[in-house]
Amino acid sequence: MADPTQPPGGGPAPRSGERARSRDRDAEGRARNARPRDGLGRPLPYGRPGVDRQPEGVVRTAGQTLTEAQRLLDAGRPFHAHEVLEDAWKSGPEEERGLWRGLAQLAVGVTHAARGNARGATTLLRRGARALEPYRAAPPHGVDVAGLITWAEALAAEPVTASGAPEAAAVAPRLRG
């Protein structure tokens, strides 16, 4: 049985000069971390079971993106919802990239809140709300921009501590009105 404290393939952990050569890489040579992750995206030791990750680079319609992101938020998996929203941010039309970036930042804000990281939660929730502001007057795809901004500001104002971290699903927003 493989030692869960060792990188895939066994052997000793790489020394700092070897780290770049031994990292998990995709077919194009980009670094990919194959470590399993928990439901909030935190890395787990190699060999431990984790939560399935969202495939990267999936091009979806706006409706598919919002439906999948909402499903993940409702399931208490905001880190994974952020990955879905990030795909839309990277592949969507230029005029909507701020919308998708803002929604992804809100999902990361929920992730930080659920992890008990008040500073990270506050920063990302407020940053996401600012990114959504230009879409308030004419929200695309049925996104409840005004409601999300109000929700983000309220959650950012709540004190969060590691011992009092909310359940991600309990504070997840509704993306569409």
Image (cartoon, rainbow, N blue to C red):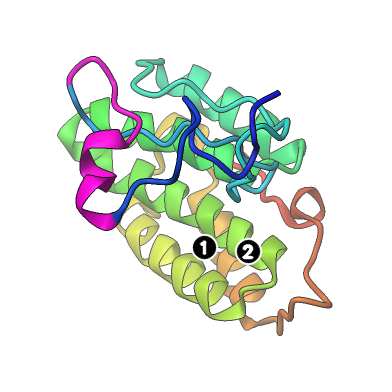
Residue 59 location, quadrant: top left
Name the one closer to the observer, 83 or 26.
26
| Horizontal side of residue 76 vs 149, given as left or right | right
Q: Is residue 93 above or below residue 27?
A: below
User: How far across and how far down the image is residue 136, in percent?
Assistant: 40, 55
Q: Amino acid at mark 2?
A: Trp
Give the residue pinned by disc 2.
151
At mark 2, the secondary structure is helix
- Which residue is located at x 71 percent, y 61 percent? 114
Residue range highlighted in magenta? 16-28
Quadrant of the snapshot with the N terminus: top right
Name the one closer to the observer, 51 or 56.
51
Q: Are marks 2 and 1 in contact (CB under 8 Å)?
A: yes
Q: Per the image, is 163 magenta?
A: no
Quadrant of the snapshot with the C terminus: top right
Q: Is residue 97 above or below residue 132?
A: above
- Which residue is located at x 19 percent, y 38 percent? 95
The answer to whether residue 82 is seen in the rendering is yes
Name the one closer to the observer, 40 or 13.
13
Q: Is residue 9 above or below residue 161?
A: above
Marker count (numbered): 2
Give the residue pinned by disc 1.
149
| Horizontal side of residue 125 vs 118, given as left or right | left
Q: Per the image, is 18 magenta?
A: yes
The answer to whether residue 92 is seen in the rendering is no
At mark 1, the secondary structure is helix
Name the one closer to the observer, 162 or 46.
46
- Which residue is located at x 60 percent, y 35 percent? 36
Q: Residue furthest front?
A: 11
